[in-house]
Image (cartoon, rainbow, N blue to C red):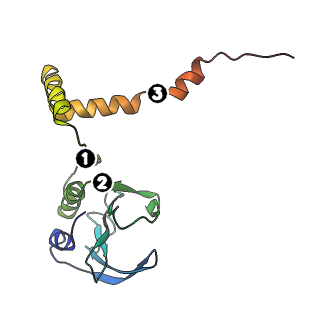
Amino acid sequence: MISLKQWMELVDYRITEGSDYHLNGENLFSLTSWNGRQSDGGYSMEIVFDQKTQDVYVVEACDYSNDRAYRLINPDIDDVEHDKTAWDDTEWTDLDVADDFIEKATAIIAGEDYDTRVQIQLDIPHDLLYKLMLQAHESDITLNEFILKILQDVIDRPKLDDIAESIAPRANFRD
């Protein structure tokens, strides 16, 4: 999770709003940095934190120009079910990696293009990582490209239940 300090540096200490924020019985505080535009380069960044402990509950980045909304929720302290809709027909994209949030938010603030894919963190044992590196080298692609291909293949693979259902014979039983 990013810290309050990291968020403040991200928005260049430009705060446009602040207010009490109530979540799951907690009295928290939110700060917003908004550039004042709803489209054509419009964005807002928000952070919700505990004023006493400085623990960050959630950070949000809204890209109004592209109708995209990203958030990073602290899983250690926030177990509340959050709304899926950010505004109108725009749904939140939940991120799991702090660097992914920082990269997207930095680009949104700068008005630059950014990668809309969601980063995930993988903990791969060293022996398996070595084998993957060799296989990626043999395929003449980067390790990241190789792992993305593996993950996409798994995602695209039909579920076993779907396969069983499609090949199961349909029998009529009579009394």
Q: Position of residue 76 (x, y in %)?
A: 33, 63
144 to 17, vertically: above or below: above
* Viewport quadrant of the N terminus: bottom left
Q: Residue at x 17, y 31 (%)?
A: 127
Label whose residue precedes the other's in the sequence (3 or 1)? 1
- Which residue is label 2 attached to? 96
Marks 3/2 in contact by CB < 8 Å: the verdict is: no
Marks 2/1 in contact by CB < 8 Å: the verdict is: yes
Q: Residue at x 79, y 16 (%)?
A: 173
Gap between marks 3 and 2 measured at Cα: 26 Å
- Element type where label 1 sits in the image: loop
Which quarter of the figure has residue 169?
A: top right
- Which residue is label 1 attached to? 121
166 to 63, vertically: above or below: above
Q: Nearer the viewer, residue 88 or 69?
A: 69
User: For the residue marked with disc 3, what is the amino acid?
Assistant: Pro
Q: Position of residue 41 (x, y in %)?
A: 25, 63
158 to 12, vertically: above or below: above
